[in-house]
Image (cartoon, grey):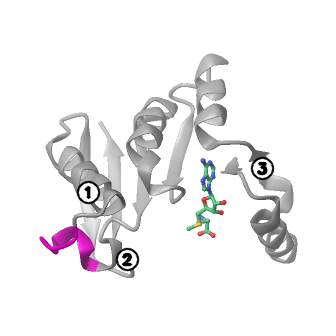
């Protein structure tokens, strides 16, 4: 399943899904991701996903994480992109709202006893979150 609000961006993605021969595997839901994730939970899909990838609007990362944590099965993996935010999370001068939210989210994950973490310092930073 893929969640996005943009017809424009996902039209590009769909072209590449076709070229890669995987389009038939992708269930694209055009709607705010929180609505789609809440609908999945309401319809009994908790603990049924193996994997979730979080890469949409940064202000909602914690909301996406909490829902994904319910949707993936124990032993399932959540991957979160942009956790370094171009290094701004480690820059005390960076006090804008999005940086503050990603910084707080990283700190929350670090202390979260529900999961095991590994953070990869590649590209813009990826956190691998294994649900216990
Ligand atoms: C950085 S892009 C990542 C897209 C994809 N993961 C990729 O790597 O190509 C962020 C995406 O989040 C989508 N987005 C923004 N707000 C959203 C929301 N509330 N619900 C779902 N998708 C959203 C944007 O339309 C955009 O396609």
28 vs 129, left or right, is right
Could you say where residue 3 lies in the image, as x and y percent from the top left? 67, 49
Task: Give the mark count.
Answer: 3
In terms of secondary structure, where does tag 3 sit? strand
| Residue assigned mark 1 | 100
Vertical order, 45 against 132 (above or below): above
In this figure, which residue is indicated by the disc labeled 3? Answer: 28
Q: Foreground mark, 1 or 2?
A: 1
Q: Judge left or right: residue 2 versus residue 56.
A: right
Disc number at residue 124?
2
- The foreground one among 35 and 74 is 35
Q: Secondary structure at mark 2?
A: loop
Q: Which residue shows up at 53% across the image and 44% down it? A: 50
N-terminal of the pair, mark 1 or mark 3, is 3
Q: Secondary structure at mark 1?
A: helix
Which quadrant, please, contains the C terminus?
A: top left
């Amino acid at each position: 399943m893929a969640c996005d609000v943009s017809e424009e961006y996902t039209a590009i993605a769909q072209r590449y899904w076709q070229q890669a021969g995987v389009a038939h595997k992708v269930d694209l839901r055009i709607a705010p991701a929180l609505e789609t994730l809440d609908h999945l939970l309401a319809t009994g899909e908790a603990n049924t996903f193996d994997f979730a990838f979080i890469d949409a609007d940064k202000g909602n990362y914690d909301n996406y994480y909490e829902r994904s944590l319910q949707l993936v099965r124990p032993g399932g993996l959540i991957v979160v992109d942009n956790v370094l935010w171009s290094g701004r999370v480690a820059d005390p001068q960076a006090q804008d709202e999005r940086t503050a939210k990603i910084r707080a989210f990283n700190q929350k994950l670090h202390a979260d006893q529900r999961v095991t973490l590994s953070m990869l310092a590649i590209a813009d930073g990826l956190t691998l979150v294994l649900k216990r």
